[in-house]
Amino acid sequence: MLPCDTGDCNYVGIRENGLMHAVLRIAFGVFVLAGSSLALADRAGRRFDVGDYGARADDGANDLPGISKALSACAKQGGSVLIFSKGRYDLTRGPRGRGAYFPLRGVKGMTIEGNGATLVAHEAATIFHVVDCSGLTVRKLTLDSDPLPFTCGKVVAAGRGSVDIKPAKGYRAVAGRSVKGVFGYDPAKGRPARRGHDCYMLDNTAPSSVTDGALMRVPCRGRIAVGARVIVRHEIYGHNGFTLRGCSGVVFDDLTIYSLGGMGIYAAASTDITVRRMIVAKGPDGKRWMSTTADATHFNTCRGTITLEDCCFEGMGDDATNIHNHFWTVSGRRGDDTLRVTLKRVRRHVMPGHPPRDGDRIEIGGADNPLAPRLTRTVKTVQTDPKNKDLIVTFTKALDARVRAGDIVWNASAAPKARIRRCTVRNNRARGMLIQTRDVILEGCLFENCSGAAIHVASDINYWHEGIGAADLVIRDNRFIGCNYGAARRVSVLDIFAELPGGRIALPGVHRGIEVVGNIFVKPEGSAIYVHSSDGVVILDNKFSEPGATAIFVNYSRNVRVTDNVLIGGRNGGLKIGKECRGDTVHAHKNSGF
């Protein structure tokens, strides 16, 4: 009972002879409450304001030393809070700087309270590199770059192997900048150009140079027409906002990314990542031609649950998200229960495939259908060959005699659940989202003007060696508007397939248990839905408006049910069943306009 609840003190009045007694009781109560608050604060950790360490917002000075000191002090005490004030903080490492601006390792329960602060990186580097941390929360923080990791403008001259670009307003010609990629842009529509040039991942090219005082000359492959508007990416991968490795229980609330030379969030071998109300935008005023040069978010070999809610991803040089792990190839056997496996291909920008752990569930494909699980075994031990980084994996049970060199294996325990709700993806190059995992609900999202497929459900051992085959995937109540018109264009807006070497399509059974329900497709270029390499697909109650090809194309699949869908304005029919698909396993009922 609080002092004010006693007979000696009440809200109506205080008896004169009880006044001192009441005041003492109130004072005692305040003391007790204050002591309790201090105790709670002590258990929760301390608060470290970057201003106390010399980092002042909007003063134009280099804030890297002060923020680094504050972060270091905060990291030493678990459960502490790093506090920014609203405003701009400039980060400059200087010519001797190496690695990320802010490395963080082994910290538990830290909170970064941005309070609307903007961190501006002045050199190409990852801003936060977070390793083996748990319980990290990041709130109301904005990340940006200056100079921008891209230059935009108009092609005014085209030579053999290079073009001259007149920079657009807000950009300038700079010599000596790396040239990693060039693609066409439509400033009037604020999106990648329809069927525009797309020169991706230039390797070993000369840096930019300046001609005629104000033009930037950049190397490129292929022919770009004079008059075309283009974006030159000086960086594509490697300089992320946040890189997470081996982390767990990480939460991002109200994170904003403007322009970075890499991804907004890259997480590898991490567990339970939640991203809410993240904004990736083309600058504070939306007038830039690009936001991140690569993906907004990317999750490689993660576990637990990946959650994306109420986010807006716009203007990226690549996807809004990619959730996947890697395929390994059997290179040899050692006895009845041990395999040597090799990671066939890893792109430079992606961290290597992460080894399985003891107790993980490994699936092994067969020779006839390499990406469909034929055999499952549990890992007993894993060793790494120091010479070539191959893995020596021993299982708790003997292997099937048919397992042999060349078979494909993958870690089903490193396939996180995904919950993606009420997100917007628009005006970006390439795909909207790559879903290469299991137990996924993707609902209530808007995909608008993605130059490639809006949703890419894939398994691939032809180019990226990413997967795995999807299972228990629900795609419902989403809207798709004007997607699949340019760079990274595919057969359809919702693209479900599995690709083998040489571009061959895998047989049914790679993807299993997929529901596509209640979605709206508006003017997709090509088909709206493409289903290959699948077993058990329900396409129910979707609406298609003026698709550029047959609304639904099914091939190399079985047990597909197409029911209660509506086609408006289609000239090529509602459903096409490919010759590699048994027609008696595809059932269409009560569809309108087909």
Image: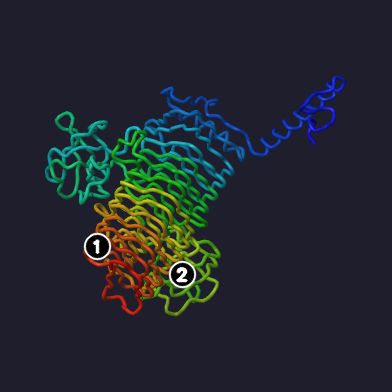
Categorize mark 2 by other alpha carbons within 10 Å: few (<14), some (14-19), many (20+). some
- Mark 1 vs mark 2: give the one in front: 1
For badge 2, the amino acid type reads Glu
Residue 116 position within the rendered picture, expressed as x and y whole percent measured from the top left: 47, 33
Q: Quadrant of residue 500?
A: bottom left
Residue 363 bears which disc, if any? 2
Q: Position of residue 466 (x, y in %)?
A: 38, 60
Measured in 3D between alpha carbons, the distance from the residue under mark 1 to the one under mark 2, in whole angstroms, is: 41 Å
Q: Is residue 387 visible?
A: no
Q: Which residue is mark 1?
A: 570
Work out which quarter of the rendered image holds the N terminus and state it: top right
Q: Name the residue at the right extreme.
A: 17
How crowded pointer 1 is (Cα within 10 Å; few <14, some 14-19, many 20+) is rated as: some
Q: Amino acid at mark 1?
A: Gly
What x and y, as percent, mark residue 296? 39, 46
Query: Which residue is painted at 49% across and 44% down in the image?
Result: 252
